[in-house]
Image: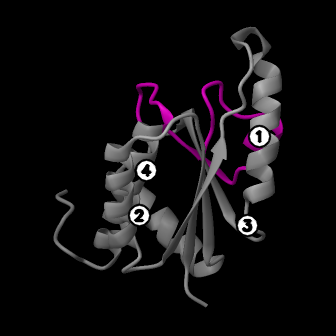
Amino acid sequence: MKSAIQIISVKSKKSAEFESLFNLYESKITNFCDVKFDDIKSYEIDRDQKEIKILKESSAIEAKIEKGSYIILCDERGKNLKSLEFAKTLEEQLVVRKKVSFIIGGAFGVSDQLINKADLKICLSPFVLNHLMAKAVLLEQIYRTFTIIKNIPYHND
């Protein structure tokens, strides 16, 4: 069974420039494992009803998580991992579970239930990032991970 990575993200808009970047990294990552994108449409609601938005988007995310996956939630309050630590963690989980599901939540984050379901919470940046930037950063780090694992010149330590 080939290892697989799933990226689940909530998105509110599309950008041709970002889609091009995502396609580039998808083509690079698929040299090492399968990658699947599951985009959840942002739930449109007034900002003062953010709890409803969080619950609806989190429910849609949970429905997409592939069974048996190691779940990594991208969260500004998550662990700050260096690239080598991230590579070690991802490599271990792809060997053990064969599937890793990454979650990028919506503008207000995800439900406590989904937070608790995550096996690991990571911080992509000390800055708050919109979903497009978060996805770009995550894809670059996943690609970097495979270059570290395969000893391909890319990462400088």
Residue 58's label in the rendered image is 1
Against 92, is 137 above or below?
above
Quickly name the residue at label 4: 138
Is residue 85 among the parts visible in the rendering? no
Measure the alpha-carbon separation of dots 2 and 4: 12 Å
Of marks 4 and 1, which one's residue comes earlier in the chain? Answer: 1
Residue at the spot 35% in from the left edge and 71% down from the top edge: 27
- Residue at x 70% of width, y 67% of height: 69
Along the viewing direction, whichever of 34 and 93 lies nearer the viewer:
34
- Quadrant of the image occupied by residue 143: bottom left
For marks 2 and 3, give the one nearer the viewer. 3
Task: Look at the picture and state if 97 lies above or below 117.
Answer: below
**What's the magenta region?**
104-131
Mark count: 4
Choose top left, top right, bottom left or bottom right for residue 150. bottom left
Q: Earlier in the sequence, mark 2 or mark 4?
A: 2
Check disc 4 and give the amino acid type.
Leu
* Mark 4 → mark 3, Cα distance in angstroms: 19 Å
Q: Mark 2 or mark 1, which is nearer the start of the sequence?
A: 1
Amino acid marked by disc 3: Glu
